[in-house]
Image (cartoon, coloured by chain):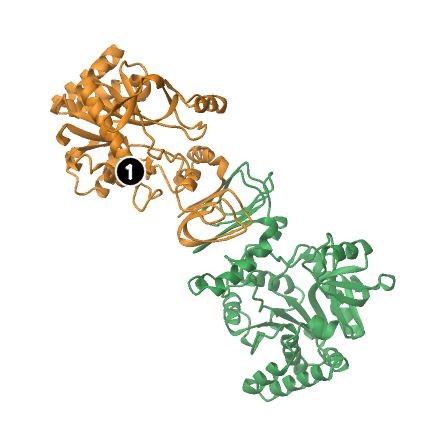
Chain colours: A orange, B green
């Protein structure tokens, strides 16, 4: 299989609020330097470019995010950036990106990669991704990547697979998918973890462009119509016609619209240290910690403090007698949060949105 | 008794570190706007000027603090500011200030008032101070102000008085002082509180200049010598001679050097809502609180947060699921501290002093 047959579609359009106050509406997670020295988007691009040459990348985002992405990646050709006409979840975005590829070459393989995930074991990830590309190309399958769960996470979707029917393709083991599961409650998550039949849904996919089109048509006449309208609009040059076709596509996630309904979906065993970095406290697992379990960006003096995460670069932070806190200083706003409750950061953002006076902090 | 006989000596030279990071070596507590809208020094001056005209004030501080005080009080005549030649505790400072008054008029009454205390009931305070001035003038006594304790404080010194011998002078009740007690441990403080014979030592005093000189001479030949050397140096114009006399005076607190050894010390019953505002958490008792007991300067959103004190003016602070914290954002430094441990702020300052790299944050 040659590299020129493969495209990387980078989903760079996330609008997460869970990293407020550092992450803002105008500066979502993929543009934050929270996992390494560089913005997560840049780390995603760097991670994959040894496998897929950057000119074969396609970054999908809205107009504003695309402007920011182009500043970060000034050497990437302009046609590597695909502006979503509207925010309509992942199914329309991936139909648009795959249609662009399909018009070029229906045989091309598309690897879909979110721009705001962390992968610790890059070598293993690339080996698995390469295997996924091979599986998609050779078997005309829709390929997903399942992460073996290490704890009963309630913040991830799960993929149930057929453990008996695993087989090796290239450098990874693949299983037929039996079902996609929404985020479970803790009791369900415990069951999933214990059974060994479930993996976290990483939101990464690989398919041939033509196979994607066929599977869409097979699962839903509505999706087939949407696909055809998008292809037609792209053929005739985009513009208002594309906006109309995009707006008519069902605003669903690709998991819900296609993956969980399609036949012939494979899941790769993806034990490469993946995290969706879903909230501030997940960085406690990622950043280096002192002996008391504190992790900080910025000079920090900790006196009887344990398990705290601090983001305050360029300033001094003093912690006295506190534990398991998330402390984030970001210009005009400061967050001090119980680390176990950091998913409530989005409630703060919702409250801010509702206030005329405080909306500027969103 | 005429107002022209009375001088106010404002002790404006404190160097507290307990309000770090807002309070710094170059900006001690008396210059902070933590109790009201204005710096505590200004509030102290305003509180007393209805009783003593500002031109009869004398502000004692070091050269740098005097510069800051003059900026705050631009209309006060230059000779209202008395620069301490060196930092040598309160006895030399009060000998110097009282000597200045004595050279003018040995009969004049001196009221000594720290610049960094809070007084909630100003009317009652002024009534008590007026009575103290009357007692000092009429009875040639050294007058102190004792605060009826409301809890077994271990952060204050105590005055033991003779409860049987209380008598009214002007608008207050005065007791003969039996002993001055250093800051007690909790068991002792419990005893003091239960006995009813002890009051907190507020560090405010009133005396006639001439009586002060006599009492100094009566308790210690060394203090008498120091007093005479300071008077002599002032008579001949200050300068190097004054610096020498000041340096030779024992570097003691006035409580230890004079008050606890002198005869004829009276303590006024001072139930006027006094606090020395000794640490951040004391402001929880002073600032208005929300229904969950949070008190803040600066816009604050509290989600399941209780009993927190926030200083972050001009910025937004979001609190999630935390309780009993002190959160202080001050430009280049941030403090997050268990409110019960805020006396450890000084340990942070000590640690900063020891580090070449971090000394700039002191």
In the shown orientation, is residue A29 left or right of residue B80? left
In the shown orientation, is residue B37 left or right of residue A224? right
Q: Relative to the observer, which residue lies in front, A204 or A251?
A: A204
Q: Relative to the observer, which residue lies in front, B323 or A105?
A: A105
Q: Position of residue B332 (x, y in %)?
A: 43, 56
Asked if residue A37 can be seen in this view, the reply is yes
Q: Relative to the observer, which residue lies in front, B126 or A208?
A: A208
Q: Residues within 10 Å of mark 1 (few under 14, many from 20)?
A: some
Q: Residue at x 56, y 78 (%)?
A: B85
Q: Quadrant of the N terminus of chain B?
A: bottom right
Q: Residue at x 50, y 48 (%)?
A: A292
Q: Position of residue A34 (x, y in %)?
A: 36, 43
Q: Which residue is mark 1?
A: A122
Question: Is A326 located above or below residue A137 in the figure?
Answer: below
In the shown orientation, is residue A170 left or right of residue B137? left
Q: Residue at x 34, y 33 (%)?
A: A15
Q: Position of residue A77 (x, y in %)?
A: 14, 38
Chain under numbered label 1: A
């Amino acid at each position: 299989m040659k590299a020129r047959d493969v495209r990387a579609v980078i989903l760079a359009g996330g609008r997460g609020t869970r990293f407020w106050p550092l992450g803002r509406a105008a500066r979502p997670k993929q543009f934050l330097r929270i996992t390494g020295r560089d913005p997560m988007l840049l780390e995603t691009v760097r991670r994959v470019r040894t496998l897929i040459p950057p000119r074969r990348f396609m970054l999908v985002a809205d107009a504003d995010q695309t402007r920011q992405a182009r500043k970060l990646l000034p050497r990437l050709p302009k046609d590597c950036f695909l502006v979503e006409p509207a925010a309509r979840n992942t199914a329309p975005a991936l139909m648009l990106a795959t249609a662009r590829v399909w018009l070029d070459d229906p045989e091309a393989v598309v690897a879909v990669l979110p721009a705001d995930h962390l992968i610790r074991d890059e070598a293993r990830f690339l080996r698995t991704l390469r295997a996924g590309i091979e599986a998609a190309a050779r078997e005309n399958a829709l390929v997903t990547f399942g992460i073996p769960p290490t704890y009963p996470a309630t913040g991830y979707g799960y993929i149930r697979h057929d453990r008996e029917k695993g087989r090796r393709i290239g450098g990874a083991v693949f299983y037929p998918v039996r079902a996609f599961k929404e985020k479970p409650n803790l009791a369900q998550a415990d069951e999933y973890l214990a059974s060994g039949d479930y993996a976290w849904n990483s939101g990464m996919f690989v398919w041939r462009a033509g196979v994607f089109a066929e599977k869409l048509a097979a699962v839903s006449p509505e999706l087939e119509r949407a696909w055809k309208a998008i292809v037609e609009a792209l053929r005739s040059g985009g513009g208002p016609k594309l906006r109309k076709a995009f707006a008519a596509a069902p605003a669903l996630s690709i998991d819900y619209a296609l993956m969980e309904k399609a036949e012939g979906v494979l899941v790769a065993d993806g034990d490469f240290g993946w995290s969706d970095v879903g909230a501030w406290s997940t960085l406690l697992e990622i950043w280096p910690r002192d002996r008391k379990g504190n992790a900080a960006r910025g000079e920090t003096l900790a006196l009887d403090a344990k398990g705290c995460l601090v983001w305050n670069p360029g300033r001094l932070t003093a912690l006295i007698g506190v534990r398991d806190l998330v402390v984030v200083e970001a210009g005009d706003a400061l967050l001090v949060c119980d680390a176990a409750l950091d998913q409530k950061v989005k409630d703060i953002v919702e409250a801010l949105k509702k206030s005329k006076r405080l909306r500027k902090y969103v």
